[in-house]
Image: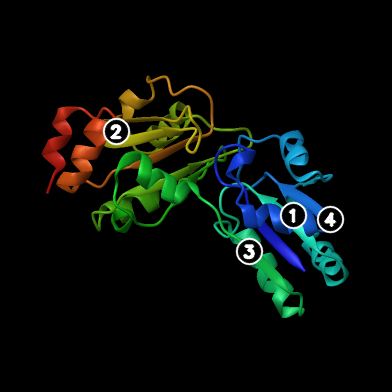
Amino acid sequence: MLAFIGLGLGNEKDVTLRGIEIVKKADTVYAEFYTSRTFASVEDLQRLFGKEIRVLNREDLEEKAGKLIEEAKEKKVAILVAGDPTIATTHIAILLEARKMGVKTLVINNASIINAVCSLTGLQNYRFGKSATVSWHKSRAFIDVIKANLSIDAHTLLFLDLNPPMLIRDAVERILEFEDEFERHFAVGIARAGSESAVVKCDRLKALSDFDFGDPLHTLVILSRKIHFMEYECLRFFASAPEELKEWVA
């Protein structure tokens, strides 16, 4: 059996009871922190589960995923993933291949950055368009996603590169390198979603680059030019949005 266990966004206490049960029954336990990360260390998780945990790298998940599937034919294999395990297409691809090979699979879902952003900001889930990643590589693909979403009055959730962790000021710099017209566009920065030290701030994009969000992990939302009045109210109270944002209420 091959089981993907979501760890949630905070520390080791965010693991579900069902997830703990599955891990304790597993013959082998792996953890993957390439596609996403949590605030729990490997040592914290090992103490919680009472099991040795082997950390997988990108190569293990992509080029060598077949070995994990082969192992799961004979053993109970659990893979720990930060957030929700089925958000990343890498994990979906492994699940699909395992099922094609007749291996029993199991997914234990948990909180992800996607629903955490909505709860922290008050932005409405159905108002979001396609998500994108701002990477350290010189790619403007995320700019095209932002523009496409703006054309349909949708917000854009931007994931920031984790290798090494990108900060909001880095992401803003990359956006303005490609499109300086976004300098006065409203956006929302979120830091350490899921933790007790989460920070949320709404302002003009350029202003966010000067705001101290503290340590990573960081996430950025580019707002639609038309927002719901309830979203405006939430951003004012949850994210200290400037009053001038009211001009975007439609």
Comparing labels 1 and 2, the label whose residue is closer to the camera: 1
Q: Earlier in the sequence, mark 2 or mark 4?
A: 4
Which residue does the numbered mark 4 point to in the structure image? 28
Counting from the top left corner in percent of width and height, residue 12 is at 64, 39
Q: Work out how far the residue at label 3 is from the one at label 2, CA to CA, in angstroms.
A: 32 Å
Instruction: Check disc 3 and report its element: helix, strand or loop.
Output: strand
In the image, what residue type sits under mark 4?
Thr
Instruction: Tell me the number on the disc at residue 238.
Output: 2
Mark 3 near mark 2, Cβ–Cβ under 8 Å?
Answer: no
Q: Work out how far the residue at label 2 is from the one at label 4, CA to CA, in angstroms.
A: 42 Å
In the image, what residue type sits under mark 1?
Val
Q: Work out how far the residue at label 4 is from the one at label 1, CA to CA, in angstroms.
A: 8 Å
Q: Earlier in the sequence, mark 3 or mark 2?
A: 3
Q: Work out how far the residue at label 3 is from the one at label 4, CA to CA, in angstroms.
A: 16 Å
Q: Is residue 9 left or right of residue 54?
A: left
Instruction: Tell me the number on the disc at residue 197.
Output: none
Check disc 1: other Cα within 10 Å, few if <14, some if 14-19, many if 20+.
many
Counting from the top left corner in percent of width and height, residue 150 is at 27, 51
Looking at the picture, tell me which residue is in the foreground, 203 or 41.
Answer: 41
Q: Is residue 162 left or right of residue 167?
A: right
Instruction: Check disc 1 and report its element: helix, strand or loop.
Output: helix
Instruction: Check disc 2 and report its element: helix, strand or loop.
Output: helix
Q: Looking at the rendering, in which quadrant would you find the N terminus?
A: bottom right
Which residue does the numbered mark 1 point to in the structure image? 23
In the image, what residue type sits under mark 2?
Phe
Which residue does the numbered mark 3 point to in the structure image? 107
